[in-house]
Image: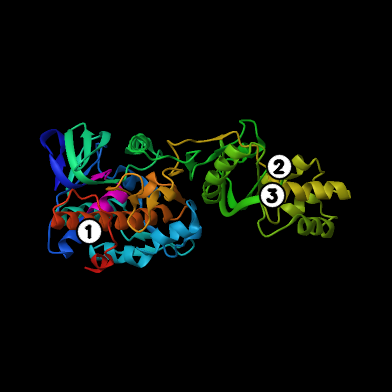
Amino acid sequence: MLETAATTTVDDVDILVVGAGAAGLFAATWAGRTAAAAGQSLSIVAVDGAKKIGAKILVSGGGRCNITHHAVSETDFAGGTPPAIRKVIRRFTVADTVRFFEESGVEFYREADTGKLFPVTDSSRTILDALVREAVATGVRLLHPARVTAISRTEAGFRVTTSAGEVLAKRVILCTGGKSLPKSGSDGSGFDLVRSLGHSLTDPIVPALVPLVLPAEHWITSLSGLALPATLALRSGSGKRLHATTGSTLCTHRGLSGPAVLDISRHWLVARHADPAATLSINWLPEESAESIDRLLIDGQRRGALAVLRQRLTERLARCLCEQAGAATTGDLTRDARRAVAAAVVATPLPIIGDRGFTVAEATAGGVPLTEIRLETMESRISPGLHFAGEVLDVDGRIGGFNFQWAWASGYVAGESAAAAALRSTAAGTAGTDSAAPVDEAKTS
């Protein structure tokens, strides 16, 4: 049931989900399904401070909502360690995601060149409607706008202060998101709640999947609108290669964007925090090396460097590269000139001066460390009865639906585990602070 906070009061609940985005709606749904599978019921309320439920879902994927990728593994994520991430995502797989939405009437298609999965409607509203429908069907109450301003522990669980009043909850699932797209409600306020409950946060917390900015006068900004495959490489100040991404790259009037740039952005920002001397470069011809470009220039010596390069690159880019190398566009080149052109092609240095910030970023890098979470249940090791799911945790995926898959998997584990513990507590007549055990059979009910 979708309720308006101004006309609704909530007193005591078994489970309060803070944040009704992708992870929150999923956690609430699976909490309700777990109770139903046991033939019992729990009072489950999901609160959200945004005026519109699921605002971030609606704008995802350009409004098309890329809900997952056809192949997902722990290597598609950063932040927490691969073994820790694998422990969660294997509990709710891509096949489980597709099955969940198909059972709610949503059909999908796979984008051939990317492996992304989209609803056949190409509308994120289809996904949001399904999530709300399934949550309400399990008896979950959705309450908004009700911004949570404080959470404190009580003997019976938690006292949660919201703009709609106070709630006493036996268990809380925190799904407040990170700091990306703050207008959607994901404004970082959840991190304050995290700290107040005794948890720490990783350092730094930076935008992820965000365009990068070059100096206004940099020659790449003159190529605005040019899109092509490229490889971006991140190196430490000592020259060690730390990370690389290959994919579509877009030159903009501010710098660089496109999938390859978005994917490497969080690695660049985190690396620079620890090592200010770290560098980023771009190879405009990913399949070529400095040696192979040098050979091409030797073989095409009579035609000139520009003629050789524009066989593989646009004329604008080819001319710029020759200019940056200080090489003549026609005529024979010296060995040093050839090497300078080759270096410009495969390792153009990128003097990044910043990023477009959280207002543009699609995700957040950093959050609650997974070491502070019991991954079997997504329950806090520090504050029993408190569970986590989604972007508030130190996990972020590359572009392609991976962050949604993390939301589905962590939301599933948190929801079914919180419900299982609440049911055990009710049966035992306790306050509900014992640790939850996985109840995988609920997934197939």
Residue in the image at 73% along x and 57% along y: 289
| Label annotation for residue 156 | none
Q: Amino acid at mark 2?
A: Cys
| Label annotation for residue 420 | 1
Question: Magenta part of the protein: which range?
Answer: 16-28
Q: Amino acid at mark 1?
A: Ala
Horizontal side of 285 relative to 415 (left or right) equals right
Circle 3 packing at 10 Å, graded few (<14), some (14-19), many (20+), is few
Percent of width and height locating residue 118: 36, 59
Q: CA distance from mark 2 to mark 3?
A: 28 Å
Horizontal side of 170 relative to 195 (left or right) equals left
Badge 1 or badge 3: first in the primary sequence: 3
> Is 142 rendered above or below residue 421?
above
- Residue toward you, 144 or 329: 144
Q: CA distance from mark 1 to mark 3?
A: 47 Å
* Residue on which disc 2 sits: 320
| Label annotation for residue 240 | 3
Examine the rendering and report whether any part of residue 374 can be seen: yes
Examine the rendering and report whether any part of residue 333 can be seen: no
Residue in the image at 44% along x and 50% along y: 371
| Element under disc 1 | helix
| Element under disc 3 | loop
Which image quadrant for residue 221?
Answer: top right
Q: CA distance from mark 1 to mark 2?
A: 62 Å
Which image quadrant for residue 312?
Answer: bottom right
Magenta span includes 295: no
Residue in the image at 44% along x and 61% along y: 86
